[in-house]
Image (cartoon, rainbow, N blue to C red):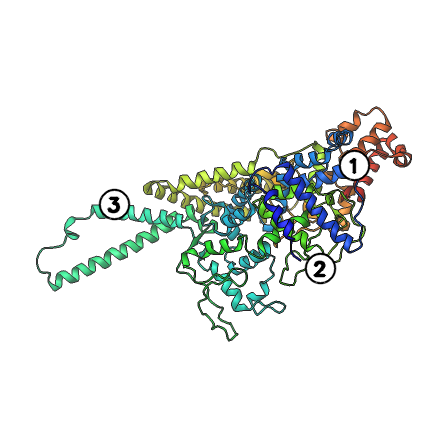
């Protein structure tokens, strides 16, 4: 089904200036209303009724969790509930969409989609910082994707290369993820054989992947620094040689002269090779990680079919030319323009999937289920219960110039966002009629950040330690690359000697570790313990001595103990370590796109019941504990618990059932634990 002629005529008026920030209020209101009308028309034709509009208490909690990624504080909930303005819901949405909490929550979702790993070499931190900043500054989605797909060089110059380095030496896997994440196409099967359920052949897969055939995991900066040093040392040695050895003799050259010239030339080449090897070995400790943190575009490198290729449309080892397989036909691309061309094709407004896929992903993020489901398995037969809504969302995304903040603002301003959740669970892969949002549980990051509210109050982003670490690293790389060759050799020799000392310290540490393990109790074990501690300190000192980047631990300083700090989830290294609260509740391991989950487990229940990190009354220093101490009566305490955990005041039935527990500190603590483990707290109603 297509948009009506009338609607097409209205679109320029709705979005008069693509890229304007923020979108005018009337534009947002009209776009949200149009989505609701299209939805409700579909429901009427299907003889279905939309769910009821939720009350203010349910809305304020849903808005904070959905937009800012955390529950509101008691003060924030009360302020909204006591506000009598008829426009307060729209005002709250706009405030939250413009808040740092929105940036934090959107980053968590995007980083999960892209599989960002903060500690993956140095580039992981740079990619994390770049992505966080790009989203906060409203870089358009098409621009952001294009910058990643066309990135090149060392991560200190272009942090977006993290997108490719995330799958270092796995170019074909990276391409499969690119097609899945940005175009919703599952084509990974065709990497090894013709796709069993789609029209993709292995040959066609390689044609598409050939757009990235020039990617090599090398650092041009490191190569240039070594060449510069070799040249400087070579010129210095040449200057010291007798001029007669190099000056050509006048007149006719004898056979003896020619032979001598050949010997001299061979000698020079051998000397140059020895010098290059010497410089390379000496500078290796300085540049050893550069190839792990850079890519190089080589126009002469071409993708070839695998040696075990078995189909008749190609030969094993055959060089493949890049060519697109749907949308605009693109082929005959100059090697040096392959990735630029691919990025332009993929992010084009005319691409049949790019805009619809991101619009559908964001719809799923807001309402709990995609208009097209599954999100990552689009094809020509993909269907939706609301095709006109999907078409309108595509146009809306383009009209908003791919500004995710403004697009989401429109979705949050719909009546659908204010409707009660569906009581039934949708069937996977079956088009869903959106009478209301789908009931979802808090994500692991939402739960983490909500506990921060209980322990510390309205926690937003603090000073970004990630950015400080990243700028320090970039400064050190710049300083190293600008060092003069002579000084670079001195630094290299020092680093080489330091590396030897470090390896010796490591060996002694392992020996001390074994000795401690074998030591008996008593004086021998105490001595072994002292020697072990001393060996560990020696390893740390040796690392600082030889490491050109002073032993920087990318992203570790910023996260504290990874789960035990006052920082929001977005400000900590990703993925969270196994055993932390975020991972326990389904936080992504960042191995596959959008791999987080909200499935309930027994360990989750135990964590909510027994873990100090989930006990907001574990001490009087917590925000909730201090607030309860200031309450003068059991009624005030019960009211505070309900407004803090559920964003609503207790009704008469709640008071009759639970007021007795607010009179005793032990019973109050048990009541708090029970409320935290309830569906009323864990689910976004």
Instruction: Identify the disc placed on residue 236.
Output: 3
Mark 1 neighbour density, 10 Å: few (under 14) some (14–19) many (20 or more): some
Among the two numbered marks 3 and 1 on one chain, the one whose residue lies closer to the N terminus: 1
Query: Are discs 2 and 1 less than 8 Å apart at CB?
Result: no
What's the distance in space between the residues labelled 2 and 1, CA to CA? 33 Å
What's the distance in space between the residues labelled 3 and 1, CA to CA? 78 Å
Q: Is residue 559 visible?
A: yes
Among the two numbered marks 2 and 3 on one chain, the one whose residue lies closer to the N terminus: 3
Which residue corresponds to mark 1?
Answer: 57
Instruction: Identify the disc placed on residue 467.
Output: none
Circle 2 SS class: loop
Is residue 526 left or right of 84 when viewed as pictured? left
* Residue 567 position in % (x across, y down): 64, 36
Mark 3 neighbour density, 10 Å: few (under 14) some (14–19) many (20 or more): few
Outermost residue, right side = 656
From the image, state whether disc 2 or disc 3 is nearer to you. 2
* Residue 48 position in % (x across, y down): 80, 53
> Between residues 528 and 406, which one lies in front from this camera angle?
406
Which residue corresponds to mark 2?
Answer: 429
């Amino acid at each position: 089904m297509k948009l009506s002629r009338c609607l097409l005529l209205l679109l320029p008026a709705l979005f008069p200036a693509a890229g304007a920030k923020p979108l005018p209020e009337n534009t947002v209101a009209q776009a949200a209303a149009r989505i609701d009308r299209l939805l409700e028309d579909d429901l009427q034709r299907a003889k279905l009724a939309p769910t009821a509009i939720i009350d203010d208490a349910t809305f304020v909690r849903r808005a904070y969790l959905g937009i800012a990624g955390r529950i509101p504080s008691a003060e924030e909930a009360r302020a909204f509930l006591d506000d009598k303005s008829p426009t307060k819901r729209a005002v709250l949405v706009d405030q939250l969409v413009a808040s740092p909490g929105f940036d934090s929550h959107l980053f968590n979702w995007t980083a999960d989609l892209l599989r960002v790993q903060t500690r993956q070499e140095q580039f992981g931190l740079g990619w994390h910082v770049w992505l966080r900043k790009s989203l906060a500054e409203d870089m358009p989605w098409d621009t952001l994707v294009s910058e990643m797909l066309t990135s090149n060089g060392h991560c200190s110059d272009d942090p977006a290369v993290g997108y490719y380095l995330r799958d270092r030496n796995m170019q074909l896997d990276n391409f499969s993820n690119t097609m899945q994440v940005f175009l919703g196409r599952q084509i990974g099967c065709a990497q090894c054989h013709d796709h069993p359920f789609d029209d993709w052949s292995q040959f066609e897969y390689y044609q598409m992947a050939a757009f990235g055939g020039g990617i090599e995991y090398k650092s041009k900066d490191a190569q240039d620094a070594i060449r510069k040093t070799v040249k400087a040392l070579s010129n210095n040695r040449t200057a010291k040689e007798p001029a007669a050895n190099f000056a050509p003799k006048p007149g006719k050259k004898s056979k003896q002269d020619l032979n001598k010239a050949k010997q001299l030339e061979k000698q020079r080449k051998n000397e140059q090779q020895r010098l290059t090897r010497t410089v390379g070995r000496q500078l290796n400790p300085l540049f050893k990680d550069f190839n792990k943190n850079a890519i190089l575009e080589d126009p002469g490198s071409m993708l070839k079919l695998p040696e075990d290729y078995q189909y008749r449309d190609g030969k094993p080892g055959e060089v493949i030319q890049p060519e697109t397989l749907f949308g605009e036909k693109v082929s005959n691309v100059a090697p040096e323009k392959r990735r630029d061309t691919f990025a332009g094709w993929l992010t084009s407004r005319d691409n049949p999937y790019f805009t619809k896929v991101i619009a559908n992903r964001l719809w799923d993020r807001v309402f709990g289920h995609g208009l097209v489901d599954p999100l990552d398995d689009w094809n020509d037969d993909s269907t939706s219960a609301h095709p006109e809504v999907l078409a309108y969302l595509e146009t809306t995304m383009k009209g908003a110039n791919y500004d995710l903040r403004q697009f989401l603002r429109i979705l949050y301003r719909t009546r659908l966002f204010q409707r009660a959740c569906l009581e039934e669970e949708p069937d996977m892969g079956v088009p869903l009629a959106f009478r209301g949002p789908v009931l979802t549980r808090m994500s692991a990051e939402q739960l983490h950040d909500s506990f921060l509210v209980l322990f510390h109050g309205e926690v937003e982003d603090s000073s970004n330690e990630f950015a400080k670490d990243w700028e320090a690293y970039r400064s050190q790389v710049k300083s190293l690359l600008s060092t003069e060759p002579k000084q670079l050799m001195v630094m290299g020799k020092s680093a080489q000697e330091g590396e030897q000392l470090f390896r010796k310290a490591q060996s002694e540490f392992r020996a001390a570790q074994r000795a401690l393990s074998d030591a008996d109790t008593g004086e021998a074990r105490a001595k072994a313990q002292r020697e072990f501690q001393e060996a560990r300190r020696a390893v740390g000192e040796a690392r600082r001595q030889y490491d050109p980047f002073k032993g920087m631990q990318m992203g570790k300083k910023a996260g504290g103990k990874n789960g035990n700090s006052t920082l929001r989830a977005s400000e900590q290294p990703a993925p969270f370590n196994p055993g932390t609260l975020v991972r326990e509740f389904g936080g992504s391991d960042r191995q596959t796109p959008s791999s987080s989950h909200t499935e309930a487990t027994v360990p989750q229940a135990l964590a909510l019941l027994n873990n100090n990190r989930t006990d907001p009354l574990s001490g009087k220093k917590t925000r909730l504990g201090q607030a309860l101490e200031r309450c003068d009566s059991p009624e005030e305490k019960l009211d505070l618990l309900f407004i803090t955990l559920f964003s609503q005041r207790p009704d008469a039935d709640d008071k009759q059932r639970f007021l007795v527990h607010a009179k005793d500190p032990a019973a109050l603590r048990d009541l708090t634990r029970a409320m935290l483990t309830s569906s009323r707290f864990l689910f976004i109603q």
